[in-house]
Amino acid sequence: MTSGTQQILALNAFRPDADAAALGGTLEGLISRRTAAFGPGSVVFYRQPLHVVSARGATIQTVDGERFLDLYNNVPSVGHCHPKVVEAVQKQVALLNVHTRYLFDSLDDYAERLCATLPPSLGHLALTCTGSEANDLALRIAGIATGGKGVVVTSAAYHGNTSAVTEVSPSAYKVGAPPDHVQTVAPPDPTYYGPDVAAGFTAAVEGAIAALEARGHKLSCLLVDSIFSSDGVFADPVGLLAGAADAVHRAQGLVIADEVQPGFGRTGTRFWGFARHGITPDIVTMGKPMANGMAMGGVAVRPELLARFSEKFGYFNTFAGNPVAVAAARAVLEVIAEEGLMANADHVGRHLKGRLEDLATRAPALGAVRGAGLYLGVDVVAPDTGLPDPEGASTLINALRHKHILIGAAGRLGHVLKLRPPLCLTVEEADRFVDVLEGLLP
């Protein structure tokens, strides 16, 4: 049985059977070489993949000198190859790179700086190499703290690729569905819940908890990406998670905020996505943007929860928190503050969203525009019916690629244009994207 959700790695992916014939010599050879080494596990973007050699700011350059505006990458969150991050990494890798069983000041300095951005109740950290590892550890901590295994997630959520985290990532499935201890709810979309989205989402979470209990699964946690990125980007209404968090706590469960996507200033007005909704999670996980592309992830947690976990298990991750990754991560925090990137995300994001909303009033192929800061989603719809149009979204994404602009796709059906550029994006770059998009619309 196939999943009812578009598999996340299939969105905007090169399709060997359909796309290979149009590649031509050099790219065809590169794809063959990649496939020979990595087999069917290899996934690359776009019907005509990019052969890239360098990047800076919000621009990626290919081997033939073409420059592409990058509105897709939230990994180099402060910009590709930011000079301050590059310098920090170069200096540190020439000096020391060990694991955290040794004492070195930069790790403790970074931990203090990171904790200062978080609610005081989240007083302890565990570092990992990826967001997947962070979510895996968070699930383990929650399970021991609550004695439960039941997990509530949204219907097209993606939280990573370890065995345990794949189980709670519906969009990771090509066939089948999550196991019995996982209950899905629809994302906070008015299509499902009507005008009172917050109340509807809260009721859905309450129903999910009851469904788990009816199947014999005590609640462990609600695991939620507070901008619902893979579900199609749902940022509003502000405060929508408060009722759901209360429902989880009444059931003696924990709230895990997966901040891999919305964290580190991306939503513009707050450093963390969950803060827009006025909640204090029990556990916060983080990854991609932490170190601008260096392998870095982490878990911030209430101390008593980590203490309970530590009574049963030790946790050590060889490469997590190494001095080179920490140097990059510290530089990221400094750049966000020194260059006002959170304010830039708010300013440029509002401008971009406003222009897209205006365009949508004149373009029948565009539907709702959603998001916060520099994380936006735009529905692509069939002009004659207004229904979701995944093929139309794919066509636009690949047409934009040929106009030297890179974006992605999201949503259960894959019909949402996903925009998450580096936080240094300028108004001029945002305008360029909208102008090109308008020229491509029917």
Image: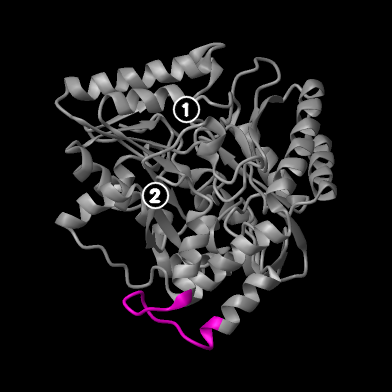
Q: In which quarter of the image is residue 376?
A: top right
| Location of residue 330 in the rendering, given as x and y in whole percent from the top left corner | 56, 67
Q: What element carries label 1?
A: loop
Which mark sits nearer the N-terminus, 2 or 1? 2
Q: Main SS type for the magenta part?
A: loop
Q: Which amino acid does label 2 sit on?
A: Gly
| Residue 185 seen from this side | no
Identify the residue at horizontal 65%, vertical 40% (top origin). 269
| Location of residue 194 in the rendering, given as x and y in whole percent from the top left corner | 53, 11
The vertical placement of 243 against 164, above or below, is: above
Q: In which quarter of the image is the C terminus?
A: top right
Relative depth, front residue between 186 and 122: 122
Pointer 2 local density, CA inside 10 Å: few below 14, some 14–19, many at least 20: many
Relative depth, front residue between 414 and 136: 136
Circle 1 sits on which residue? 241
**Is residue 116 found left or right of 71 in the rendered image?**
left
The dot on residue 377 is: none
Relative depth, front residue between 322 and 421: 322
Q: Which residue range is magenta in the image?
A: 92-105
Mark 2 → mark 1, Cα distance in angstroms: 22 Å
Q: Check if residue 234 falls in the magenta segment.
A: no
Q: Is mark 2 on a helix, strand or loop?
A: loop
Q: Quadrant of residue 282?
A: top left
Circle 2 sits on which residue? 160
Identify the residue at horizontal 79%, vertical 45% (top origin). 430
Q: Quadrant of the N terminus?
A: top left
Q: Quadrant of residue 57?
A: bottom right
